[in-house]
Amino acid sequence: MAKTSDYFETYMYPELVERREKLQDATRSRPADPGLTRLLAEVDAALSRIEEGSFGRCETCHDPIEEDRLRADPLLRFCLDHLSPSQQKDLEEDLEAAARVQRALVPAPKLEVPGWHFAFHYEPAGVVSGDCCDLFTPDGRKDEIFFVFGDVSGKGVSAAMLMSNLHATFRSLAAAGLPLPTLVEQANRIFRSTSLSRTFATLVVGRLSTCGKAEICNAGHCPPILVRGSEVETIAPTGLPIGTFYSCHYEATRVTLEPGDTLLLYTDGITEARNAEGEEFGAGRLEEMVGQLGGSPAPEFVSRVLDSVRDHLGRIPKADDLSLFVLQRPVEPAN
Ligand SMILES: [Zn+2]
């Protein structure tokens, strides 16, 4: 875990020293506050652990403490397996609250978007997910629909909260009527300014017109698959993952979907699902399979791909979130 301790020495140590100074200021004005005194002792202990090289190890089993938890709380002393009952209860409550927030962020299944059918599946590997799946019409703009789909790096509550953050950023920026690449560039700068240095998100952001035109920015995400009859094409990335650098340039791919055409988006939990032999499901298999589904209704794309991934996994539990999103032009005119 050399990388982890380098990271904490370089970034966390000075940050903790700074927080310690603030705490000392607060202790001077409220010397009788036992909470502040205890916190100061905990910060001192964490600084000593960094100096001694024992930082980030569980005091019970001496295994490394989960890195995303340590980033959120550098004062931690125990791994998830060795929490006290009250710490365990707090954690469960936090996770449950985060899961509730997330469940409210996916599109309502009964949502109607003019000119399009859609279907999706959103399945966290744990209680919460770092995957993002959103479809919405910005306020006052009934003629266009936006979608945001992708995956935030990392796991657990921190990834889930970053995902919620991105969700809100895109929803507020979309109402401003900016060109799509500019919107993604702004979202990237906001994300970069507000998140930790090693987090990023691979996203596909799209703007749809009610008549089938789609403008798509693929920020380093698995290429969406466009299915026309039995023909399959993919939409390659048009920029780096969100959060890679502060200034990133994005371009948009423009496609027009005819009635019956389908756009399928997925996260790498689908293509990287491994069976007992260690073999990945793979993008090639997915493309071949959706080519054979051309012309099927949107929900069938979702259910058939999931069935196939689950068959592939067999008894092996999934290691990552599984998310799929299907947008389709109805064969019947929408109005
Ligand atoms: Zn432990």
Image (cartoon, grey):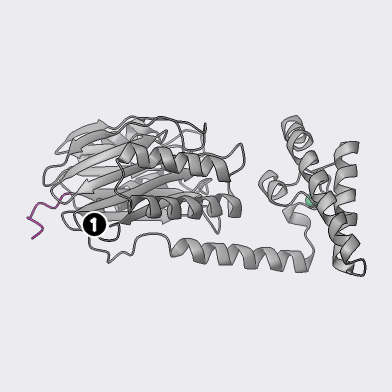
Q: Using the image, determine if residue 328 lies above or below residue 235.
A: below
Give left or right: position of 24 versus 286. right
The residue closer to the viewer here, 4 or 297, is 4
- The residue identified by callout 1 is 141
Residue reaching furthest to the front: 29
Residue 227 location, x and y as percent? 20, 38
Residue 267: give x, y in percent of width and height. 42, 42
Image position of 86 with respect to 309: above or below: below
Q: Which residues are magenta?
A: 329-335
- Magenta: predominant secondary structure element? loop
Decide if residue 103 is in sight here: yes
Q: Quadrant of residue 171?
A: bottom left
Magenta region includes residue 334: yes
Q: Residue 127: image x %, image y %?
A: 55, 59
Is residue 176 found left or right of 267 in the rendered image? left
Q: Is residue 259 above or below residue 83?
A: above
* Residue at 81%, 53% in the rendered image: 22
